[in-house]
Each structure stands twice: as structure tokens, then as C-alpha cells.
Image (cartoon, rainbow, N blue to C red):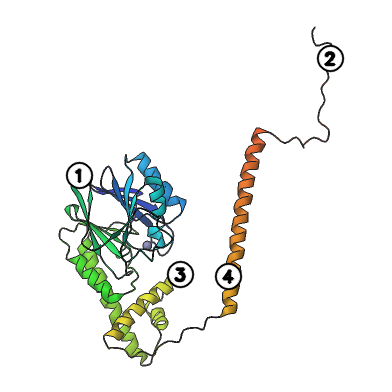
Amino acid sequence: MRTEVLVRVSPSVRAVQVPDDDPMHPQCTTIYLVGNGQALAIDSGEAVDRYRWMLRGYLAAVERCDIALAAVTHHHADHSGNLRWAREVFGATVLVPRNGRTLLRGRLPSRGVELLADGQVIELDGGVRVRVLETPGHTRDSLCFYLEDEGVLFTGDTMLGSTTTTVSDLAAYRATLRRLLELPNLEVICPGHGPLIFDPRERIQAYIAHRDERERQILEFLERAGRPVTSWEIMLALYPDIHPRLRRAADNNVRAHLEQLAREGRLEVTPGIPREPDPERRAREAEHAREQERVIRLARKYEAARRRALIRAQESPPTEVWKRPPRYRLVGRARE
Ligand SMILES: [Zn+2]
């Protein structure tokens, strides 16, 4: 499905869909605006210009409003990268999950931060009411926002537009999906990445079925193996065609299943042995990071110097092109 850059979702909701080519973010990363006049932004993208310009351009060209409230669905940097910027540029109050505050350290403004908890209602102009739902599973601070009057649910990464998501706590995630299924009046899901979901209940059911199916596949693999195996072996068998960059995410999902099965007493677990920290390697990595920083700083300096030189050259062309500059001498007299 093709995605449009700007979409009106419901009377109070607009989607600003920013194209994204990261395999973790199929098709787009979306910032949602809720309410007219003083708007609520749900997620604000990565801390790169693309998101800021899209948002500012959109607000300037289409909307006559500022962002009064900037909320996030969870602490991941592709959702929360512009909170400080939203505070600086719009003076927005920043709304973050109460469980996410420490995870968001370094990305929050020093003032104007409020914590969100389950059941809280965000009241906007014109009687628009957005309810906060704590929906752990993708991360432990994951929130959804529900605008029940218009049937619009904002899910962040709890549900995605075109794929399933990664899960850190499977039992919590399953409970979250069951809870979302119970929401009254649900019409459309606004995910953090990918297209809008217009068959919300079917999709939630499909997510639940998908997790059940994965669990069945994992149990069958374990049975066939008949020996202790790692989550990575299971992942490779279950996701044979996966993009290499997504393997670790898939492995995490398999591990979430294994942890739940272990808690249920269905697995015998041989504990892993963590790798010894290697001080030499750590020192090498730190040195490499410092070197990168140095090169980046230098490159920025050269870039700026070159830009300045170009502008200077336009206004005052260089004189050193002459070995000997032309000379001019008056013919006759100054007054004829
Ligand atoms: Zn994300």
C-alpha cells in the first residue's frame, strides 16, 4: 500500500507520514496531530532535520496551530528524538510515560515535562478527549492513546502498519492485545510506522494468532531438536528469509517466547554464561569513537569554511588570478 505524506484520519486527527527506508520501519514513520488550535503531537520522530522540517512545513502550510503538547508512545529514539526541540520551538509541554522517564534521560527538556499514567485523560480544545492506556509488551513503558469519540487508537510500536512488532515481555504483550481488542468504538489504528489500519479488530486478532502460531512453531522445533538449543538456532529456522539486520530483533522475539514458556514450567533452561568484559577491546572501541568524533568535528569545520569561502568569492572575486594586473593610464587630460 502506498502512503501519503499528509492524511486526515478523522475530524480531529492528522497524520504526517515521513518516508523511512530503515528495514525496522517499513514505509514511513508517522507523527500524529490531534485537536485543532492548540494541538497534541503523538510521537515526534528521530532527531534529524527531515522530521523537524516536515512538521514545521506542515504546520506552516496547512495548519494554523502550534504544538501545545508533545506526547510519546515509548522511549525509543525514533519516537522521542524531538521532544526537546518541540519544547524549544513551540514551547510545548512534553508528556512522557511515567515508566519511561529514566529511559528518556538526555532527550527531555529541563522544564515542562509531565508524566502520563493509565486512565489519564488529555483534554484538548473543542471537547476532544484522549485517554492514556498503559500497554506494556513492546517496551515496558509503551503507551497507547485512545480518542474514543472518533474511534482512533494510536499504538506507537505496539502495533505496526504492515508488519508485526518486536516484543520484550510476551505475557504483558498478550494482555495488552487482549485489552486493545476490548476497546469500544474502535475504527482505525494509527501505528508509529507504516500505513493506517482500517480493520483494527481483525488486525489485533491476527497479531494474537501470530504470537500463538510462533509459540506453536517454537514448541515443535524444540520437540524435533530433542536437545538443548539456543534462541538463535530457533530464529534461523523460523525466519529463513529475514533481512540480516532484523535477525537480532527476531531473536529477541524468540527469546521472549522462550522466557514465557520457561516461566510456565514448560522448558528446562541451562543458564547462559555472559562474555567476560574485555578491557582491551573496550579501550579500542572508546579510542575508535573518539577518533570518529574528531573526524566528524573536522568535517563540519571544513564544510562550513568551504561554504563561507564560496560566498566570499561571489561577492569579492579573488585578485590572485593576475601575475601582473592590467594597468590603466589616462589618454589626454582629465578635463577635455
Ligand atoms: Zn519505532
First reached walking from the N terminus: tag 2 or tag 4? 4
User: What's the amino acid at mark 3?
Assistant: Arg
Q: Secondary structure at mark 1?
A: helix
Q: Residue at coordinates 33% horizontally, 65% vertically from top-left?
A: 163
The earlier-in-sequence mark between 2 and 3 is 3
Give the secondary structure at mark 2: loop
Q: Residues within 10 Å of mark 3 (few under 14, many from 20)?
A: few
Tell me if I can see residue 60 in this picture.
Answer: yes
Q: Position of residue 250 (x, y in %)?
A: 38, 74
Badge nearest the viewer, 1 or 2: 1
Label 2 Cα neighbours within 10 Å, binned few <14 / some 14-19 / many ≥20: few
- Check the image and name the residue furthest to the left: 184
Q: CA distance from mark 3 to mark 1?
A: 45 Å
Decide which of 113, 134 is in the foreground and name it: 113
Q: Which image quarter: residue 118?
A: bottom left
4 vs 139: above or below:
above
> Under tag 4, what secondary structure?
helix
Residue 286 is marked as 4
Q: Which residue is mark 2?
A: 331
Q: Nearer the viewer, mark 2 or mark 3?
A: 2
Identify the mark nearer the N-term, 3 or 1. Answer: 1
Q: Nearer the viewer, residue 178 or 68?
A: 68
Q: Quadrant of ligand 1?
A: bottom left
Residue at 36% from the left image edge and 79% from the top image edge:
255
x then y, percent, for residue 76: 39, 63
The circle on residue 126 is 1
Upstream in sequence: badge 4 or badge 3 = 3
